[in-house]
Amino acid sequence: MMISKRFSTIRRVSLLLAILIGFACGPGAEEMGEFFSLFQPGSATYSSADSRYIFTPQLYNAGLFGVDDAPDSASAKANTDAWVIYLGAGYPSKLVGNALADTSANNPLISQLKGAKPEAATYLRFAYTAQQASGNGSPWGEAQPDTVQLARLAAQARTATLATNDLFLKERYAFQAVKLADEAGLFSQSRDNYEQLVATLPRQSFISGWARCRLAGALLSLGQNNRSVFEFAQVFANCPTRRLAAERSLRHHGLRFSDEALAFAKTDAERVAVLAICAIQPKQDALPLLEKMVDLDPKNPLIELVLAREINRNEYYFAAKQFPGYVENDETRADSVAFETRRKNVPEYAGKLLSFTEKAAKNPALGNPAYYLTAAAYLQYLSGDYTSAKTTLDQAAQQPTANQTLKQQMALQQMLLLAAQPGLPDAATETALISYLTQFKQASVPDTTEPYNTNFRFTNAIQTVGKQVASRYTATDDGQKSSGWLSGCSQKKTGDSAQMAQTGPRQAKAFLMRLITTGNSSAGYSLYDFDAQMALEDSTSLRTARNLADYVVNPGSEFDERLVKLAGIDTDYAYQLLGRRAMAEENYQAAAAAFANVKPAVWQREAVRNNFAIDPFSVNMPGEGKPRNPYTPAQFASKMADLLKQAISQRNADQRAQAWYTLGCGAYNLTYYGNAWFMQHRFRSSAEPYTYRYGATEVAKLDHFWNDPYYTAKTAQVYFSQAAKQAKSQELAAKATYMAARCEASALLTRRVVEAAKTGGYVADDDSVFNAKMRGLAASDYATFLKTYQTRYRQTQFAQQMQTRCALYRDFMAGE
């Protein structure tokens, strides 16, 4: 039996949607099958073919975006081999295989069989006719089935089954009778054909398994879901060439375990088959099924995989913040409620899993205590019982195992336990941690030529450890203790005042540990969070940046050197960061000194040439054009420092005002909207500010953007306002006021993006309600200097020049 149309159509639609979503939006973590997990399913022992049943947020742990559309290649080989044995000498495998794949009745095998084995030739011609009627005759497309002909062929197959004495052909005609009746929509007849023609055969091969799979599909169409689950389960357990089809049928149709399905079983083997196929289905807790599997058949090959699935599934719910879908109707609303209920049940379910693993580790019938002890230690770690986790993990390490992934998992958990301990890490802990971090960072990207092929669990572990250890370096209470992941938090967050109390090296170590959690350009897909890396750099204080530079330039130990190397930075990076943070905090002299320490070759790189090419004091006034930048970064910062001194010390009012104005131009260009943003931030994107990182209810985090001078030009606005205030020249005052108004306009643009993000949805440009709100905000909070300019300076020569030479000036004056 090939998988019927109702199954193949679902797969094709799912595959198409996955491809469209993937190419339209780019792959996210869930599209890549990634989620927060620290327990490797490969720690379990299972066949490679069953790896598709590892837990994943997708449909399968296989195929493109989780769509396991691979054909069951074992079927064709098994059928070819059976025919070769049946036909005997003179019929090579290649001849037979090609003939079985050819839907024409004029292939060489048919010609050869006409005289030697006419009954076999007759069957093959019949099979080709049936294939054509099913609509599967062409490999290039799929025609609609001819149900009238299918019904007629089903009756012919039944007659032929009863007529032939050849058991090999009898079984195949019987299969055709079941299959063709099912495809014709005669589901009751398909069931009867199976029971009367297949079940009564004195000898059965895999072909009877194919027929049973068709029977299960017919029962499903008849609404007999419980028996259908039972039949699919027996195929899954006993017919390798229809194992995939049987499991796919349950998954695609949402069939789940029921006591009624189990009741059809008459033997323990049949019961375990039902439990096993149901235990690997999504959207259910399978621990009760797993416990029954252990009782009935402790050697079942899926037991360890099912346990890994349940641990990973519980991790998924723990990390999920909300239902990963849209609530559009009653069905999706029910899914959403079930998801939230299950998410809240994570700690309780973890406790049940721990109890199971502790018992399993002591069960000699199961074997492999190393696996169960490792799983138990991990669950103890999650609960915050680090002492027990360490003891159990040490016991696991003493057990023999040839599973290299399990050995890696043990090492990973040792690293997690080291990071979770309270207090400032001592030298021995630091040495052990840096060795583990180096090992797992390298292992997270096995092939650097394929950075998207990563072990996301290793990167999750690196991020977890980096954040925990960073918190330990900056914590004020060295005795604070984590209560475990399942209690909702790992380490307390440290405020700025607490960080100020820490020594320079500790601040530097904490920064580097956090930097490791964001990865770098060679760290691989799941570790490389460029936005987070930029957010870390752009929020770092000048004090921390200075401590980092000292730490990188003068490492005090081998650990310091290894940590810097692991973070992927050097002195040039440290001095650039120091310079940028000094610019952000208006310490221009410190910035100049830092930039001067960067190797000249760095400033010749393409990124600098492209993003620091225009005079940083040019603000696109009429007639200015885009003058070439004559400054190095150090010279620019030094001039900013000199201008600040002049603005404070000059006695002449217009000279002071001019200094303030020029300083304002430089400060404006240091913002997101300027031409020298590269001297304050390392990266710029049209997607900024990154409001998409936060939910609509995370108001404080969203509001941070419209309070950030980089996005609001607030620093430049202050400088321009000083220039306008102190200028005696009306022309200079007009120009300074105009630029202060431009700063307000820039801030308003940022505010609009933030307010749109707070709605939680898409805001159209012509949304009248939203636009009315923004007009109100513009008038109340972002029009001070515009009103002043309109009132005082519209008759100045500067204003007249802008009126005639600036295309956007009228819109600006109208507040647009």
Image (cartoon, rainbow, N blue to C red):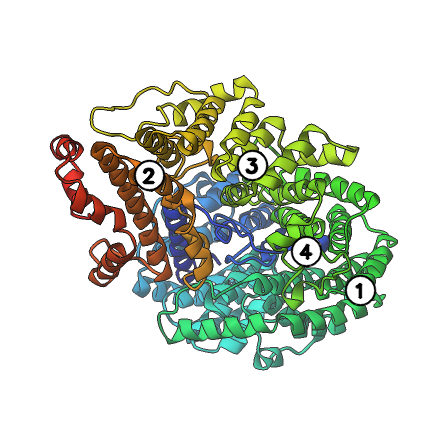
* In this rendering, position of residue 570 left or right of residue 68: right
* Residue occupying the point 39% across, 69% down: 327
Badge 1 amino acid: Leu
Nearer-N-terminus badge (3/2): 3
Nearer-N-terminus badge (2/4): 4
User: Residue 704, how many percent across, how many down?
Assistant: 44, 53
Per the image, the residue denoted by label 2 is: 720
Per the image, the residue denoted by label 3 is: 451
Nearer-N-terminus badge (3/4): 4
Q: CA distance from mark 2 to mark 4?
A: 56 Å
* Quarter-of-image position of residue 543: top right
User: Residue 286, how many percent across, how many down?
Assistant: 63, 70
Badge 4 amino acid: Phe
Confirm or deny contact between disc 1 and disc 3 (CB under 8 A): no
* In this rendering, position of residue 487 left or right of residue 109: right
Q: Nearer the viewer, residue 6 or 532?
A: 532
